[in-house]
Amino acid sequence: MIQLSSPEETTEEEIEIPKRDDIREDLISKLKDDLGESLVATEIIAEVDVWARVTKEAWLETAQVLLTRYNMKYFNFLSAIDWLPSPFGRDMDAQVDQPEPVTPEEMTWGTTGGETRFQLLARVHDPENHLGISLKVDLEDTDLSIESWSSIYPGADWHEREVSEMFGITFLNHPNPVKLYLPGDFEGYPMRKDFALLARRIKPWPGIVDVEDMPGEESEEDEVDA
Amino acid sequence: MSDTADTKQMAYIAAQAADARVNLEIETEGMTLNIGPQHPATHGTLRIVVRLDGEQVISADPLMGYMHRGYEKLTEVRTYPQVTTLVNRIDWLGSFANEVPFILAAEQLMEVEAPPRAQWIRTALFEMSRIANVVLFLGDMGVQLGAVTPVFFAFRDREFILNQIEAVTGGRFHPNFDRIGGLKDDLPKGWIDETRGVLKRIRNFCDEIETLVVGNEIFQSRTRNIGVIPADIGLSYGLSGANIRSSGVDWDIRRDGGVGLVHNELDWKVWTHPDGDSFARFWVRLQEVRESCTMIEQILDGIPSGPVMAKVPRIIKVPAGEAYVETENPLGVMGYYVISKGDLTPFRVKIRSASFNNVSITPWLLKGVYVPDVISILASLYFILGDIDR
């Protein structure tokens, strides 16, 4: 085998240099100046995406700042995340046929971390510079209410109604706080993890055959990507 | 005409005019009109409660949920490969395009990339589902305004596109063909030549629509300056796709920062229109169908050879993480926010569908318009109920 470069150079190349993403780094550093203490955590995946977690008090201000100072005119979506591990265990994810008692798992959070069970997730976008940011905010279990964005982004109206009925989060100063999809007298919040998907409790999903090993074949779980 | 008949007619006209004057003086009471859930002018089951003052809309309140299927909840109990079956049914006219952003999000989390050939075929099918979807809009818009002919042309020519999609995927409406790491199969023999012929038909269809509908005086007077959406308001409601491009916003994810598809290697143009009215939305979509034909023709000429599937484990476990991937679907921007905890199933999937945002502008847009325009505005916004209700 022909050595194209000296060994020293090769080792240098092998060290992965983390990609820099100046546009997103710049956005975050400016946001830090504008929001100060309200910006709890940020995360950047270079040339892919950027996240920011803010305090509940600064939720409305964040939208205002992003719209006026960062040209984030495009409202993409607003939703929520319930970080509670499913109390129904594995029977909810097509793995075993019979529900069995499970020890509750620890709650873990995703990108930019978290402290509470419910998090609000929103995304806005700058259509001229093609830069989007995902925003998160923690909501204490004791007070599941937050200022509505609909005065700043009118498109948030319907998204907040959906989050409100699906997760049971109240939006303050919302112009029309009624249910969007569900019938008016519906009880419970379907998208919460402790809301059982009844069809699954009664009859396990037959799709389990898709992920079972074929007989006489070794598990290919450890196979690595090409 | 005899004199007596003439006098009679004049008297009749005078009486009618007098009636009309009286009617003007009568104060009209507000009226509530239910458009839908079952109405010939609705697509699927969107119900709009409009309050009218005479012919003018005071307020419009869309009510939906008649078709809500809870896909976001269901994704939490499906393995990743099973999710494509669900999301096929979100926008059922351009179903392949629904699978793409979800697969791309999963691929981003797994750090897998589809081989070039798979990416090119994906792009071809993606654009074909756009044609299958938008061609129907071009015909249906005529029906909403009282012209029945275009829709027959649309159904006739869409069939050829669906046949080509079926030849590759085996499904006319629900292909379920996209896989994490590539595609299920390669193209069948002879498909490329057949597709060239079909694209010619679609181009002819576009020309037909242009002469039949776009140039029609009645069509123009029913759509020009009707339902005008200024760019800033459209953006703040999250309008996307042709709806926002027809308000003069030059933004298309296929060109600006799209991942996973090969649009940037093709030579094509993003069409915009400055007016922002119903006519502009129709016109932009018509040009986009032609542009899709151009793209597919280039893809057919340039598909690289090679495998259509990357090496991925047979049991797919997606590493923990979060990813948001969006693509420019036929109806507008569609994105999936996927949260994985390293399991067989997604922990949470937020489906950002285009029609939901596109329709959320209707209470603002319909205020003050006249009843016949309600229909043409709704038709020009072009939504699929499955894409609103998910």
Image: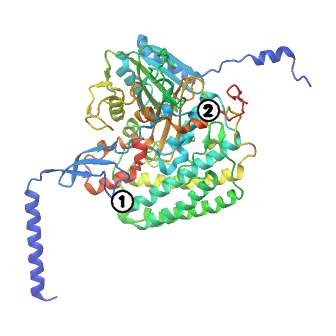
The image shows a total of numbered marks equal to: 2
Q: Residue A135, image x and y in percent?
A: 45, 23
Q: Is residue A209 left or right of residue A37?
A: right
Closer to the camera in the image, A194 or A54:
A194
Q: Residue at x 28, y 57 (%)?
A: B372
Closer to the camera in the image, A5 or B33:
B33
Picture quadrant where residue B365 is located: top left
The nearer-to-camera label among 1 and 2 is 2
Q: Quadrant of the C terminus of chain B?
A: top left
Q: Residue A25, image x and y in percent?
A: 55, 19
Q: Is residue B310 left or right of residue A155?
A: right
Whether callout 1 and callout 2 share a subunit is answered yes
Q: What scheme was used to colour the molecule?
A: rainbow
Picture quadrant where residue A15 is located: top right
Residue that carries the numbered disc 2 in the rendered image: B107
Specify the label residue B211 is tagged with: none
Q: Which SS class for mark 2?
A: helix
Mark 1 Cα shell of 10 Å, populated few (<14), some (14-19), many (≥20) = some
Q: Are marks 1 and 2 in contact (CB under 8 Å)?
A: no
Mark 2 Cα shell of 10 Å, populated few (<14), some (14-19), many (≥20) = many
Q: Is residue A182 left or right of residue A132?
A: left
Q: Amino acid at mark 2?
A: Glu
Residue that carries the numbered disc 1 in the rendered image: B144
Establish if B98 lies above or below A194: below
Picture quadrant where residue B11 is located: bottom left
Residue A189 seen in the current view: yes
Q: Which SS class for mark 1?
A: helix
